[in-house]
Image (spheres, rainbow, N blue to C red):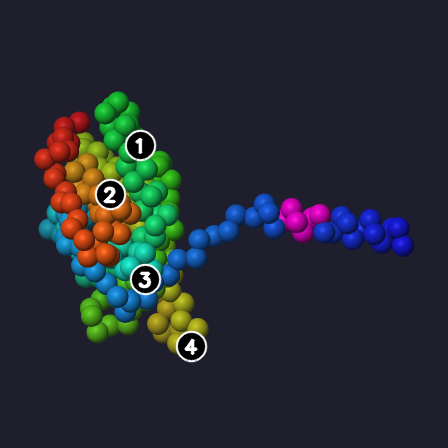
């Protein structure tokens, strides 16, 4: 009897340790048809392959989903339209990463030697991704990893979101299974600051309540002369 009590005590202790020591993964999904609040457009840069390799200007359309407290970045790349969703935790991670990048920028502590390392220097966030070729095509969806860092292009540093490959698996129809592409998104400091401004929770709460929201002034951000 005494031996049984000892075993039971050890088992309960191990279970308690496993429960309290486990880091729960954030569960974050979005209903595409949930109520939405338009937030306007911002600019960024995306990789280009035609007619010449390099980077090109792109437009991101921002939308707030108040029910899920999610911000969507909609953009097109290689004929695919992406809907990249950011949770509240993800937005906070972006804002903190940008602050670190700006400190490194001012200190001239940015390196162009290894883009694989620099593109994830400030951590990563779990996002949610939807993608399709056109509005009437099948809409795939899956969790996606978003790295936060920087990369150099034409000797100029850019703050980056590196969108990893996402995998959609349809349990009923395997023909719908598909992968998204890996896509780096390049931001000047002014462009990244504008996104951080829109990611701010107080701004979003004001937007959802129908109140007057402040406007971003890009003139407050110095030019990217590195």
The correct choice, above or below, for 138 with respect to 199 in the image is below
Q: Quadrant of residue 36?
A: bottom left
Q: Secondary structure at mark 2?
A: helix
Q: Nearer the viewer, mark 4 or mark 3?
A: 3
Give the mark nearest the N terminus, 3 or 2: 3
Residue 202 in percent (x, y) is at 26, 46
Q: CA distance from mark 4 to mark 2?
A: 39 Å
Query: At x 16% / y 38%, what residue is drawn?
Result: 190
Q: Nearer the viewer, mark 3 or mark 2?
A: 3
Q: Residue furthest right?
A: 1
Query: At x 17% / y 27%, what residue is drawn?
Result: 226
Instruction: Report which residue position mark 2 lands on.
Output: 196
Region of the chain picked out in magenta, as a range:
13-18
Query: At x 25% / y 31%, what residue is drawn?
Result: 102
Of the pair 119 and 107, the residue shown nearer to us:
107
Q: Secondary structure at mark 3?
A: loop
Instruction: Report which residue position mark 1 lands on.
Output: 100
Give the label on residue 172, or none.
4
Residue 35 in percent (x, y) is at 26, 66
Q: Nearer the viewer, mark 4 or mark 1?
A: 1
Give the label on residue 60, or none.
none
Which SS type dominates the magenta stretch?
helix
Residue 131 in percent (x, y) is at 27, 63
Query: Can residue 123 be seen at all in this image of the molecule?
Result: yes
Give the mark nearest the N terminus, 4 or 3: 3
Tell whether 9 sits left or right of 77.
right
Tell whether 45 sits left or right of 93.
left
């Amino acid at each position: 009897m005494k031996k049984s009590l000892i075993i039971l005590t050890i088992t309960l202790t191990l279970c308690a340790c496993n429960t309290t020591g486990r880091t729960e993964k954030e569960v974050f999904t979005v209903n595409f048809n949930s109520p939405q609040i338009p937030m306007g457009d911002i600019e960024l840069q995306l990789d280009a392959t035609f007619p010449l390799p390099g980077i090109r200007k792109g437009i991101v359309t921002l939308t707030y989903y108040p029910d899920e407290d999610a911000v969507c970045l909609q953009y097109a790349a290689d004929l695919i339209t992406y809907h990249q969703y950011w949770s509240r935790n993800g937005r906070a991670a972006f804002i903190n990463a940008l602050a670190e990048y700006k400190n490194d920028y001012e200190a001239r502590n940015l390196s162009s030697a290894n883009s694989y390392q620099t593109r994830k220097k400030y951590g990563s966030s779990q996002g949610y991704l939807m993608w399709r070729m056109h509005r009437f095509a099948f809409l795939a969806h899956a969790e996606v990893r978003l790295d936060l860092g920087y990369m150099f292009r034409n000797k100029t540093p850019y703050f980056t979101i590196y969108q990893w490959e996402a995998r959609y698996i349809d349990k009923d129809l395997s023909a719908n299974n598909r992968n998204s592409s890996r896509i780096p998104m390049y931001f000047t400091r002014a462009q990244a600051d504008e996104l951080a401004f829109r990611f701010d929770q107080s701004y979003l709460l004001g937007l959802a309540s129908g109140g007057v929201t402040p406007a971003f002034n890009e003139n407050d951000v110095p030019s990217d002369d590195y």
